Amino acid sequence: MNKIHPTAIIGENVVLGDNNEIGPYTIIYGPTKIGDNNLIGPNAIIGTPGQDTRNPRHDSSGSVIEIGDNNIIREFTAIQKPCYKEITKVGNNVYLMQSVHIPHDAILEDDVVITPMCVLAGITYILQGANIGMGSSVHQFSVVGQYSLVGMGSAVTKNIRPFSVYVPEKPLRVNNYAIEKFGFVEYLDEIIPYVKEGRLPSSDKLLSLVDKFEHLHMDSKRALYK
């Protein structure tokens, strides 16, 4: 059973799974699909049209937002509909803290953390396990790699390799916290040269995720932090 505050507004074509909690004054427009066990705080807005300067009155009536399971979406966070692709997507076990802006056509994979007051621009990819530090912004088309960390207050204008810590005007370093948390310690000897030199790993587990990042990087319009 879902627990929906009486002041929340759930629009047409919103599909809710089970055991979701939706707080006061939150608005959800369809078409939106939300899975199970999500906590959506007060004054969140999900499903408004994407903000695009090329077409500020974009018809988003058929555009879709998909939100998976076990996510926390805190107060004053906005998730907007796609403008150019089929979907704006939030995966599973994602934690969006207070006042986060998720734009049109963004893809957030599982286990992502975005801390308060962060702003993403359109068509960004935040890959599995990435963490965006407080008050940061991410430029359009950027790809933030798996299990990477963006330092607080950063303006991200290039792509960030998996397992990296990005702090402006400093060389990339290895995100040891995520490596330990997500079970990659045994691969550290391969991760270090990849982060610092771009040397591709050889183990299948690492190579599959690095391949995904590298393909998205090549398809994007962004350079790469080194």
Image (cartoon, grey):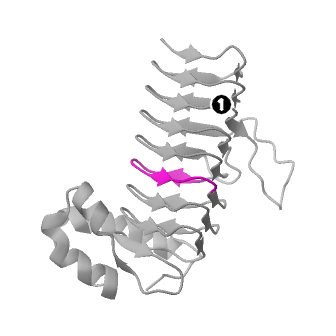
Magenta segment range?
A: 106-117
The stretch drawn in magenta includes residue 108: yes
Most foreground residue, 124 or 134: 134
Please identify the quadrant where the C terminus is shown: bottom left
Tell me if residue 172 comes above or below residue 138 in the rendering. Answer: below
Q: Is residue 135 left or right of residue 166?
A: right
Instruction: Check disc 1 and report its element: helix, strand or loop.
Output: loop
Q: Is 149 or 105 nearer to us in this picture? A: 149
Residue 71 vs residue 65: left or right?
left
The residue shown at (57%, 61%) is 124
Residue 194 image offset from top left, x and y in percent:
29, 80
Q: Which x, y percent locates residue 82?
A: 67, 48
Q: Is residue 161 at least partly visible in the picture? A: no
Amino acid found under the numbered disc labelled 1: Pro
Residue 172 is situated, as x and y percent measured from the top left of the image, at 40, 82
Overall secondary structure of the magenta section: loop
Crowding around mark 1 (Cα neighbors within 10 Å: few <14, some 14 to 19, many 20+) is many
On screen, residue 168 versus residue 182, left or right, reads: right
Residue 19: image quadrant is: top left
Residue 149 visible? The answer is yes
Question: Residue at label 1?
Answer: 42
Q: Position of residue 187 (x, y in %)?
A: 16, 69
| Image quadrant in which you'd find residue 60 | top right
Give the residue displayed 58% in from the left and 72% down from the top: 154
In the picture shown, does residue 13 fall above or below 224? above
Instruction: Please say whether residue 19 is one of the residues in the magenta stretch.
Output: no
Query: Residue placed at 22% from the left, 60% from the top?
Result: 180
Location of residue 40 with respect to 206 vertically, above or below = above
Residue occupying the point 70% across, 36% down? 45
